[in-house]
Image (cartoon, rainbow, N blue to C red):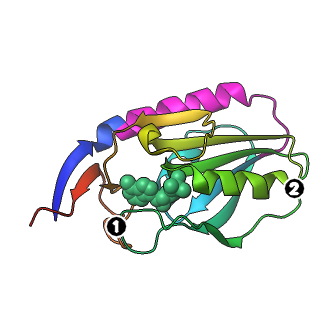
Amino acid sequence: MKLTPLIDRRRIQKRVEELGSEINADYTGCQNLVLVCILRGSFVFFADLIRQISLSFSCEFIQLESYGCGVDSSGSVKIISSSLDNIENSDILVIEDIVDTGLSITILYDYLLSFSPRSLKCCSLLDKPSRRQQPVSINYVGFSIENQFVVGYGLDYDQFYRNLPDICVLDLSKP
Ligand code: IMP
């Protein structure tokens, strides 16, 4: 396995600050903002991003399972657990690590819409548009990347590498 740095910590930090500023501006005056952390991959991004947001908001957590162990989507996405409670009429902003095929966010949107929120948007640190199977709209994107499997900054391969401070490409074909 070979790890090649793709986006270093300084670029990530700068982009997280920019995203925070955009969100602060767009949600100014919002009374019922709920930020939803999608576990497990987005926990590092979520922790950094929320500290760039100076508005009043609550945090919720949903755990999805879309990958077993490997680099390809299993094609089936399940909601494993959810802490959502009384979010009717809330402005929901989903915080994702990466949108790949779009299957997870599509299932998540259906689930969240069943709570009748006032608005529903998504902020994803990474986007792999070339892999899309479901058309989805992502309102805030940190970085658009090629069709490469990446780890670090919360993203894993088989639950490992989440602690890497930089986002790296993982090449499994290399020793
Ligand atoms: P999607 O349902 O195919 O859009 O996949 C979304 C989920 O797949 C993400 O939240 C990640 O957990 C995982 N995923 C997709 N691409 C990668 C990657 O390059 N590295 C690590 N996880 C990934």
Residue 146 in the image: state x and y as whole percent: 33, 39
Check the image and report above or below for 120 versus 84. Answer: above
- SS for callout 2: loop
The earlier-in-sequence mark between 2 and 1 is: 2
Using the image as rendered, state which of residue 61 and residue 25 is in the foreground.
61
Secondary structure beneath label 1:
loop
Q: Image check: 48 left or right of 69?
A: right
The residue segment tinted magenta is: 12-33
Q: Which residue is mark 1?
A: 157
**Which residue lies under the disc numbered 2?**
115
Q: Is the residue 121 above or below the residue 155 in the image?
A: above
Considering the image in quadrants, where does the C terminus appear? bottom left
Mark 2 is surrounded, within 10 Å at the Cα level, by few (under 14), some (14 to 19) or many (20 or more) other residues, namely: some
The quadrant in which the N terminus is found is: bottom left
Q: Nearer the viewer, residue 55 or 1?
A: 1
**Furthest residue toward left:** 175
Between 135 and 123, the one lying in front of the other is 135
For image coordinates 38% across by 73% down, the residue present is 159
Dot 1 amino acid type: Tyr
The residue shown at (54%, 47%) is 133
